[in-house]
Image: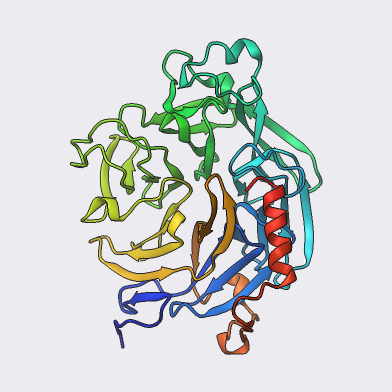
Amino acid sequence: MAYRRKLSQDVLTYDSGKAYNGYTLFAPTFEKHAWLVDMQGRICHHWELDNPPASHGKLLPNGNLMWQAKGEGSIQDFVGSGSELVEYDWEGNKLWRWDEPGINHDFLVLPNGNMIINVYVPMPDEVTRNVKGGMPGTELKGKMWSCCLKEITREGEELWEWNLYEHLDIEKDVLCPLCPRHVWGFINSLDLLPDGKVLFTMRLLNDFGVLDPKTGEIVWRYGRDKELGHPHCCSVLENGHFMIFDNGLHRQGADPELQIADIAASRVLEIDPATREVVWNYMDPLAPNFFSAICSGARRLPNGNTLICEATKGHIFEVTAEKEIVWDYWSPFAIHRPNYWGWSISATVWQAHRFTPDFPGFEGRNLDPNRLEFAFRERGKKDIEEEETIKRLTSLGY
């Protein structure tokens, strides 16, 4: 029987008859933990890991966690930069690792077990000098960087690599005038099309496109003239449409197609690549209420609902095709961390993923939330682990 009520401090809404019931995986950005919660917000499993995430983790069909992490070799000046891609088993044992400074934002695990990774690479000076846009003088130590996609094997072989800057147009691919000139293009998410092509976003160009790895060409693009605002999380849907989380940061001009003004508000867009039309969208009725300037994601669920992660608030919620919120969860995990203005509390969650109870990776696993308990400490006292975590995050540039 379906029910709808306020469940706890973390889950504000849950309509069991309309939601896509299962377990939700997410990782707080500034912690070394990944969490699996049920629809009531109860923790059913968690991984304690060696390093905080550079982006997010993905659960593999065998129940292992693939984790892109921010280790000692990270390029500290770049957001989303890590230094390792690590596979952990269900118990948190390390099974496989790829080390590469500058690995960032997103990765793909291919059906054959290979991975496509995204790596920051420096651009030649002659290219940097000609790139247009961005705030003058904000190159990183006089250099600009771009992104390089690579396919790698478990054995450590690199099968191909593709440099984004070699396929951009100096005249048309102009950087956002309100952003620094440290990265041209800035790939921040990836997805695999059924035919092997790769869908990818270019955050600082307010654009996303499709790469054909066989030819090395970008065969489809969208966004430069559509008033996107530094988007994230592109994905291909079962109907062949593309979905994207349009953050809304630095959006230039109003969008008459969606009747949205030039304001800081996020939205989720479903686009028909054949007609280039927006066929579905989600915005909050009070547009500024739904806004995350960075990170974030949207995933279409098999029942037609959409799971949305409003990253900077640690807010994960599920909406129907009619835009009704049927599950509403707020991450309880936050950290007191340094920033440019001193210290702040951050509950940021990069992205979230939903899995059904019959997901193959759950077979034989104990997901009973009652087996877990929580320990409290005396108010006002810090423990050694918290102090060491803060020191480590500070040294990594957080």
Q: Residue 94: percent from the left, percent from the top?
A: 78, 62
> On screen, 209 above or below 169?
below
Residue appearing at x 72%, y 45% in the figure: 83
In this picture the colour scheme is rainbow
In the current view of this chain or complex, which residue is farthest to the right? 155
Q: Residue 250: percent from the left, percent from the top?
A: 36, 35
Q: Residue 70: tell me if it is visible.
A: no
To which quarter of the image does residue 378 belong? bottom right
Residue appearing at x 26%, y 49% in the figure: 280
To which quarter of the image does residue 328 belong? bottom left
Residue appearing at x 62%, y 70% in the figure: 361
> On screen, 312 above or below 23?
above
Q: Nearer the viewer, residue 142 or 163?
A: 142
Q: Residue 76: percent from the left, percent from the top?
A: 67, 40
Q: Residue 83: tell me if it is visible.
A: yes
> On screen, 26 above or below 242?
below
Q: Nearer the viewer, residue 74 or 392?
A: 392
Left or right, 238 with respect to 183, comes to left
**Tally of numbered discs:** 0
Left or right, 393 with respect to 195, comes to right
Q: Quadrant of the N terminus?
A: bottom left
Left or right, 66 with respect to 222, comes to right
Residue appearing at x 59%, y 23% in the figure: 139
Left or right, 289 with respect to 40, comes to left
Q: Residue 263: percent from the left, percent from the top?
A: 27, 41
